[in-house]
Image (cartoon, rainbow, N blue to C red):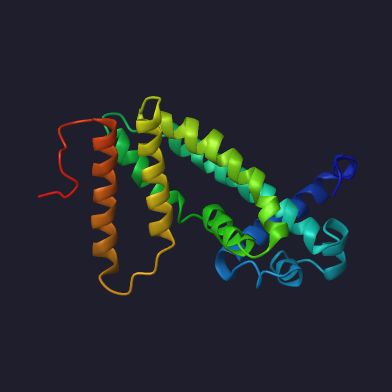
Amino acid sequence: MDAARLAKDTPKSQKTRARILDQAMRLIAEIGYHAATNPAIADAAGLTRGAMLYHFPTREALVEAAVAHIQSERSTLFRAAAADLPSGADVTEHAIDSYWDLLHSVPFVAFAELEAAGRTDPAIHALLAPAQAEFDRAQAGDDLVRILHAGAGPRFQASRDLARFMLEGLARSTLTYDKDGRKERLLQVIKRATHMLNRKGDIQDLWPE
């Protein structure tokens, strides 16, 4: 939908559009991209098919808007987490715990589902690329620097990347036994590795004794 059309939308129409995008995000997170069809999203938003077509006449138009909406929600949550540093808390551990929680929120799960679909769908892959770059550079860069209180340079970048990508991989993993125990131990190892790379404290070993 073009900018001129959006500018002419009434407040009611804008609210309806926002409701559609919220439901699209929720359904993509809950049942996956392919099952979250336009009719399913219309039903979840309480709209007729005609009303849905008014706002999003094609699947492509809806997906493009949904990607932007999901990315905006991810960025908002990330900035809020970066700003919420409790006084006296270990900032590295708080950052890792915060990002771990974010990875299980609806916007982050929905984006992960789109990334999975984009692996074999060039159109989705192309839509996601700018959002991925924005998040990588603007969010997981500047905000993680602030969260982790890390410095500049390859070593500190490696510490942020290690924490981020290990958490993302763990969030998408399927553990078939001792799920909670194994995840908790891995989270502790990630925290210790990040401390070691940042040279914070006296941690010398990845495995806590």
In this view, the residue farthest toward the front is: 154
- Residue at image point 24% right, 36% down: 196
Residue 32 seen in render: yes
Work out whether 51 lies above or below 138. below
Residue 20 seen in render: no
Whether residue 143 sits left or right of residue 66 in the image: it is left
User: Where residue 33 sits: x, y (%)?
Assistant: 64, 66
Label tally = 0
In this view, the residue farthest toward the left is: 209
Front residue of 39 and 198:
198
In this view, the residue farthest toward the top is: 152
Can you tell which quarter of the image residue 170 is in?
bottom left
- Residue at image point 83% right, 62% down: 58
Can you tell which quarter of the image residue 48 is in?
bottom right
Whether residue 197 sits left or right of residue 23 in the image: it is left
User: Where residue 14 sits: x, y (%)?
Assistant: 79, 48
Whether residue 88 sits left or right of residue 123 in the image: it is left
Whether residue 179 sits left or right of residue 207 in the image: it is right
Work out whether 116 lies above or below 194. below
User: Where residue 192 sits: x, y (%)?
Assistant: 23, 43
- Residue at image point 63% right, 58% down: 25
User: Where residue 52 sits: x, y (%)?
Assistant: 82, 63
Front residue of 51 and 65:
65
Front residue of 46 and 130:
130
Work out whether 48 lies above or below 63. below
Work out whether 70 lies above or below 157. below
- Residue at image point 32% right, 74% down: 176
